[in-house]
Amino acid sequence: MSRSLLWSLVCCLGLPIAAVAQQKPTREQLVRQDKQRILAEGFWIYNDLDRAFAEARKSGKPLLVVLRCLPCEECVKLDDELIDQDPVVKPLLEKFVCARIVGTNGLDLATFQFDTDQSFAVFLLNADGTIYGRFGTRSHRTEWVGDVSVAGMARALEGALELHADYPANKASLAGKRGPKPVVASPEKFASLKDKFTDTLNYEGDVVRSCIHCHQIGDALRDDFRRRKQPIPEEVFYPYPHPKSVGLTLDPKERATVTAVAEDSYAAAAGFKAGDRIETLEGQPLLSVADVQWVLHQASPDGATLTATVVRKGSQDRLTLKLPRGWRRQGDIQWRSSTWGMRRMATGGLKLEVLPDAERRELRIPSGEMALRVQHVGQYGPHAAAKQRGFQQGDIIVSYDGRRDLLSEADLLFHGLTDRNVGDEVAVSILRKGRPQQLKLPMQE
């Protein structure tokens, strides 16, 4: 909990600090306290994008929009460091019109396209809607170290100010930072959300229940494909590939500087080296790791060739990153909250893990063949479908729909959601305490 939030609780409730520390606020309280704190400080425009764009047009300043899902415990430290007067970031923030958005209700999805498994995403824009860049990424459910930092945020802000100073002469290089027309104009218009939410938060009632969280946008997109009995596209299944999926490890304290290149990776084949500063990718200037992900997200899963401009030891060079068909499948999706919905669809609520080599050898499962252990069995609603069909924690899946080459949970989910439709029954072979059994799983919405 941040110092300012703690102090607000002490003042508003008349409680001693020790008592406050012991009483964890509810989600509803956190959202309302956040609004009270931000409005009292007066620096951020709270949940009002129309006002933010108007002020940016009037002032000539660039616009900074933070999409911050509340209350996300995983990203609260980074958020507090940005908002609680960080000595490096705060002077840079003062050069922007800053808006804080805590729900995606009514959000313009033509402009604000981002990795919806994030709960902290930053957009840096011109008042006319041109996007300078994005900030905020993650490759783990709870850990942000190695992906983002306050220093990296400062570099992104500096880069956006440089682009703003050169605008509109550089407008053509920024065109690719906006994506294609979205499926719906705003989140509440998705079929699975339209009867549950409106385009505004309900502060007069239950504000938490009225909020469309970031991850629900991605969930609704996948649900739409599933409802129409269409395969979930690879770019939707594997969204916003992390640079590590192509072999690049980038410094979270810089804009896009390579710290390591994985052997035998696509990046290694392209000639990337540690120390390279990637200035542009596909002609787009890069402000952060999130900007790299944006370019990768737009690349076709059927194969793509991307051109990078890098600075190496003071000299500029051009590299060509060749991505073959299926390249996205190198990425890790298990940390994503969206994976839970896909588990409901394809495994009836099972969470799977790769069986360790020692246990594989003990069970005489050949190397290169499927061996996924049931780590968790869902207990409620559609997530309990596998439980109702007899699956148990500890079961080892060795065949799914006749396939023995699905070596990871992601492989299995991808097969289930691209080759099977709602209503299908999938045969599953398992080992339970070393003994083979045959079960079936229903494919669900």
Image (cartoon, rainbow, N blue to C red):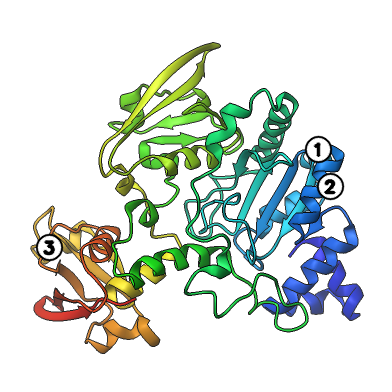
Type of residue at label 2?
Glu
Other-residue count near label 2 (Cα within 10 Å), few / some / many at <14 / 14–19 / ≥20: some
Is the C-beta separation of discs 1 and 2 under 8 Å? Answer: yes
- Give x and y (percent) for residue 36: 84, 68
Find disc 1 in the rendering and name its residue.
Answer: 61
217 versus 298 height, above or below: below
Mark positioned earlier in the residue sequence (2 or 3): 2
Describe residue 412's horizontal placement relative to residue 54 as left or right: left
- Give x and y (percent) for residue 83: 78, 52
Describe residue 341's horizontal placement relative to residue 263 as left or right: right
- Considering the image in quadrants, where does the C terminus appear? bottom left
Find disc 2 in the rendering and name its residue.
Answer: 55
316 versus 65 height, above or below: above
Q: Secondary structure at mark 3?
A: loop
- Considering the image in quadrants, where does the N terminus appear? bottom right
- Identify the residue at image location x=62%, y=65%: 72
Image quadrant in which you'd find residue 357: bottom left
Find disc 3 in the rendering and name its residue.
Answer: 403
- Give x and y (percent) for residue 264: 27, 31
| Pick the front one: 432 or 76 | 76
- Give x and y (percent) for residue 350: 31, 75
| Pick the front one: 78 or 222 | 222
